[in-house]
């Protein structure tokens, strides 16, 4: 696939060849993977948008990595189909799938310079040195590591190594980027910076990206959409707003949010609300449309920007709940006492008692 130059910025040219278009849709149909008795991926249907940043989020062991490895071709599905850019790649080896994958451990070659690390896949393809150098410079430019090309990996910081790994993955002209917790080896500060870098780069180049993480903050901050997984299945696929505000079931409601959604039981169904929606009387403007509760507060945690109130709701069998008040709500709250709290009616979420699936709003009778 040739380079084209537009106004000084090098971009890949699709050149009318469907295989060279950089933006591809990834689609999996009824994908399943068994490891002996273990069902790691249990019938997943998923379709990315073009150029989307799609996050696979879920607890440890839910099948995220296995799903990604099947898309990459590193794991053979037990059943199902994988399509990249419209083509059935289920039986193609990884290198024929035009994907680039970056794992948690970047596995750079320690004895090679950064430039040679990045060039390595091109050399393996038999590309001539001049074209190779041009592409190395291009990829290094994208990640701002031009000044590091002659160093070796051990002379780099964690964040710089990560960028080298991304650059190396990118020179192969992938149509899809698959990332498996690529930031988890970095410390918190570096991780935030690397997250910004990665998102900026992804937006600039517009490559379809599938990103695995168990970190909901990363998922909410980075994903155009999030597929929330549990036990090998996708529980919900939606924008960060959708999965947070309109969870498809109790699992999603409680996996997202820190603290998670408060959940209460009443005859026939469950209902819930987010800790930040649970406010003391007199604070919210929409007083007329709010549902009142008696909140007995046991303990208060001051976290600077907010206060967490721990306690229980009298009307619902003393169910334990948490309220999160922003620092702008300065109302004094005393512990070991009942307080009048309320939730806006449209912020209540309702779930089926048996299977936990979202249901239509129900009247609350007490
Ligand atoms: P983590 O966030 O901990 O990496 P994950 O969501 O990526 O978890 P997977 O690594 O996909 O989960 O694993 C899904 C399930 O499949 C787990 O129960 C795991 O033990 C099992 N599993 C994964 N790989 C293999 C394997 N090669 N052999 C047997 N079982 C496996």
Image (tube, rainbow, N blue to C red):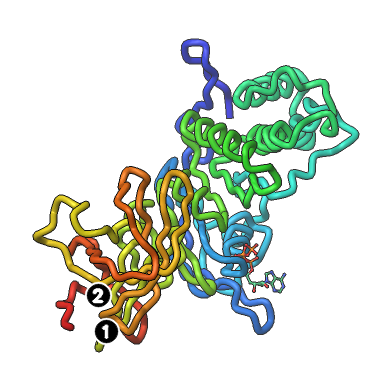
Residue ID for mark 2:
359
Residue 210's spot in the image, x, y percent? Answer: 53, 50
**Residue 4 showing in the rendered view:** yes
Q: Residue furthest top?
A: 7
Looking at the image, which residue is at 31% across and 65% down?
A: 273
| CB at disc 1 and ligand 1 closer than 8 Å | no
Which residue in the structure is indicated by mark 1?
Answer: 266
User: To which quarter of the image does residue 132 belong?
Assistant: top right
Residue 350 at x, y = what percent? 26, 73
The answer as to whether callout 2 falls within 8 Å of ligand 1 is no
> In front here: 121 or 254?
254
Label 2's element? strand
Looking at the image, residue 232 lies above or below residue 103? below
In three-dimensional space, the C-alpha distance between marks 2 and 1, rounded to whole angstroms, equals 14 Å
**Residue located 49% across and 73% down the image:** 43
Q: Residue at x 62, y 69 (%)?
A: 61
Marks 2/1 in contact by CB < 8 Å: the verdict is no
Question: Could you say which is closer to the camera, residue 21 or residue 177?
Answer: 177
Disc 2 crowd rating (10 Å Cα; few below 14, some 14-19, many 20+) is some
Comparing labels 2 and 1, the label whose residue is closer to the camera: 1
């Amino acid at each position: 696939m040739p380079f084209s130059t537009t106004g000084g910025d090098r971009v890949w040219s699709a050149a009318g060849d469907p295989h060279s278009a950089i933006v591809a849709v990834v689609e999996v149909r009824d994908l399943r993977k068994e490891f002996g008795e273990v069902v790691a991926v249990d019938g997943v249907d998923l379709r990315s948008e073009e150029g989307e940043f799609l996050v696979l989020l879920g607890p440890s062991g839910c099948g995220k990595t296995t799903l990604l490895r099947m898309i990459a071709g590193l794991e053979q599905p037990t059943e199902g189909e994988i399509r990249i850019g419209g083509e059935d790649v289920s039986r193609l080896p990884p290198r024929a799938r035009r994907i680039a994958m970056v794992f948690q451990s970047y596995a750079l070659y320690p004895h090679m310079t950064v430039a040679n690390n990045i060039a390595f896949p091109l050399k393996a393809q038999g590309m001539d040195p001049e074209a190779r150098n041009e592409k190395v410079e291009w990829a290094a430019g994208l990640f701002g590591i031009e000044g590091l090309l002659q160093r070796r990996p051990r002379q780099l910081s964690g964040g710089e190594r990560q960028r080298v790994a991304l650059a190396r993955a990118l020179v192969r002209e992938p149509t899809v980027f698959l990332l498996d917790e690529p930031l988890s080896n970095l410390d918190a500060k570096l991780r935030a910076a690397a997250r910004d870098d990665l998102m900026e780069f992804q937006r600039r180049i517009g490559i379809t990206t599938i990103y695995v993480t168990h970190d909901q903050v990363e998922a909410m901050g980075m994903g155009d959409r999030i597929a929330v997984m549990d036990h090998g299945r996708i529980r919900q696929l939606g924008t960060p707003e959708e999965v947070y505000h309109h969870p498809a079931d109790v699992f999603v409601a409680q996996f997202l949010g820190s603290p998670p959604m408060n959940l209460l039981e009443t005859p026939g169904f469950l209902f819930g609300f987010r800790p930040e929606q649970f406010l003391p009387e007199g604070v919210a403007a929409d007083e007329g449309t709010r549902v009142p509760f008696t909140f007995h507060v046991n303990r208060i945690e001051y976290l600077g920007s907010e206060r967490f109130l721990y306690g229980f709701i009298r009307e619902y069998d003393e169910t334990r709940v948490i309220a999160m008040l922003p620092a702008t709500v300065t109302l004094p709250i005393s512990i070991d006492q009942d307080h009048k709290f309320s939730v806006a009616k449209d912020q209540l979420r309702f779930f089926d008692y048996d299977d936990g699936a979202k249901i239509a709003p129900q009247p609350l009778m007490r």
